[in-house]
Structures are given as structure tokens and as C-alpha cells.
């Protein structure tokens, strides 16, 4: 039994280095958005600002997962991206609703729950920033700077967070 632990540990670690590359939303971008979300929640930042990062991570991971399904299992059907996106929102917000994090009557902005409002804004901004990065690459024929596809969405979400911070004070 003691020999199985090092062998299984070695196999698990080696799979990290042999994993196939995903080409949809890049994994680094997803990790950067997740790190931003974790940091904002840890620091006790307003739910609207945390929602920006939640929206970004939902959009990023849902398109990433949809592309993975297409490449790995050749699954491609009408409205696949939209269905995966909808299911991603459901998988995030149903547990948040039942745990009482979403839906508190005093945690609203413009009559909408702060986390839902921030997620909607963050989702749209992340999507538009990713489209901007793709547009720049298509127009120039190359990227402007290394890690552009990561930097533009993260910069846009950070800028929106700073703006919301000063607006909500």
C-alpha cells in the first residue's frame, strides 16, 4: 500500500505536465480572473465589484468548456455556447441563492442584487474586452504585446472595479 501512494502521486503530477492545450478562452486568463475574484472576496470588497470578477470567470470558463467539448468529444450542436453559458450561470447562482448570499433585500443596487448586477456587468465587459483583443489581432495581423488576450480583459475588469469602487463609496 505504501508503494502505491508515491506511484499515484507521480502519475497525478505528471498529468499536469502532459495535459492538452485548450484554445478557446485561454487558461491563464481564466486563472487571472479567478485570482482577482478570490482577492476581492478576501479583502471584503463590495459584492458589485466581486460580481464583475464572477461574471468574467463565468464567461471565460463556459466558453473554454464549450470549446473543450468540441475538441475532445466532437460535441457541437446548435446554441451549444449559449447553453453551456446558461448552465454555468445556473451552477453558480443556484447555490448562492440557497445559501442566502444572493437575494438579500438590503444588498441591492438599482433594485437588483449587487452580486447579480456586478456579474451581468462583468460578463458583458469581459466578453467585449475579449472581442476587442480578437479585433486588434485580426486588424493588425498580430498581437500588440505579449499576453494581450489576458491583459485586456483583466485591465477592463480592474478599471471597471476601480470606477465602481469610487461610485459606490
Image (cartoon, grey):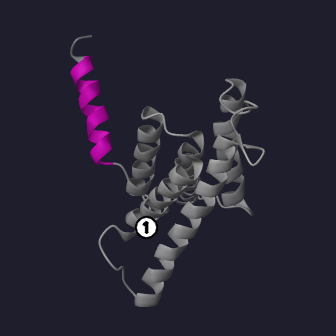
Labels in figure, total: 1
- Residue 121 highlighted magenta (yes or no): no
Q: Residues within 10 Å of mark 1 (few under 14, many from 20)?
A: some
Left-right relation of 137 to 147: right
Q: Quadrant of the N terminus?
A: top left
Q: Position of residue 119 (x, y in %)?
A: 63, 49
For the residue pair 160 and 142, the one nearer the viewer reads as 160
Q: Residue at x 54, y 61 (%)?
A: 126
Q: Position of residue 131 (x, y in %)?
A: 54, 73
Q: Position of residue 66 (x, y in %)?
A: 59, 56
**Residue 151's quadrant in the figure?**
bottom left
Q: Secondary structure at mark 1?
A: helix
- Residue 17 highlighted magenta (yes or no): yes
Q: Which residues are magenta?
A: 4-18
**23 shown above or below 68:** below
For the residue pair 136 and 103, the one nearer the viewer reads as 103
Left-right relation of 75 to 35: right
For the residue pair 112 and 80, the one nearer the viewer reads as 112
Q: Residue at x 54, y 43 (%)?
A: 50
- Quick one: which residue is furthest to the top in this view? 1
For the residue pair 59 and 22, the one nearer the viewer reads as 59
Which residue is label 1 attached to? 152
**137 shown above or below 56:** below
**159 shown above or below 141:** above
Q: Position of residue 106 (x, y in %)?
A: 72, 32
Q: Residue at x 65, y 29 (%)?
A: 101
Left-right relation of 110 to 34: right
Does residue 56 show up? Answer: no
**133 shown above or below 21:** below
Amino acid at each position: 500500500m505504501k508503494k502505491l501512494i508515491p506511484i499515484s502521486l507521480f502519475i497525478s503530477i505528471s498529468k499536469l505536465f502532459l495535459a492538452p492545450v485548450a484554445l478557446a478562452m485561454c487558461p491563464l486568463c481564466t486563472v487571472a480572473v479567478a485570482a482577482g475574484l478570490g482577492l476581492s472576496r478576501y479583502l471584503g470588497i463590495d459584492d458589485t465589484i466581486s460580481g464583475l470578477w464572477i461574471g468574467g470567470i463565468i464567461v471565460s470558463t463556459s466558453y473554454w468548456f464549450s470549446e473543450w467539448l468540441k475538441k475532445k468529444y466532437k460535441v457541437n450542436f446548435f446554441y451549444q455556447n449559449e447553453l453551456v453559458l446558461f448552465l454555468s450561470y445556473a451552477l453558480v447562482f443556484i447555490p448562492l441563492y440557497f445559501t442566502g448570499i444572493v437575494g438579500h433585500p438590503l444588498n441591492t443596487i438599482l433594485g437588483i442584487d449587487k452580486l447579480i448586477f456586478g456579474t451581468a456587468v462583468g460578463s458583458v465587459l469581459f466578453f467585449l474586452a475579449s472581442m476587442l483583443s480578437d479585433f486588434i489581432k485580426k486588424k493588425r495581423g498580430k498581437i500588440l504585446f505579449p499576453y494581450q488576450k489576458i491583459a485586456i480583459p483583466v485591465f477592463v475588469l480592474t478599471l471597471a472595479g476601480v470606477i465602481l469602487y469610487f461610485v459606490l463609496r
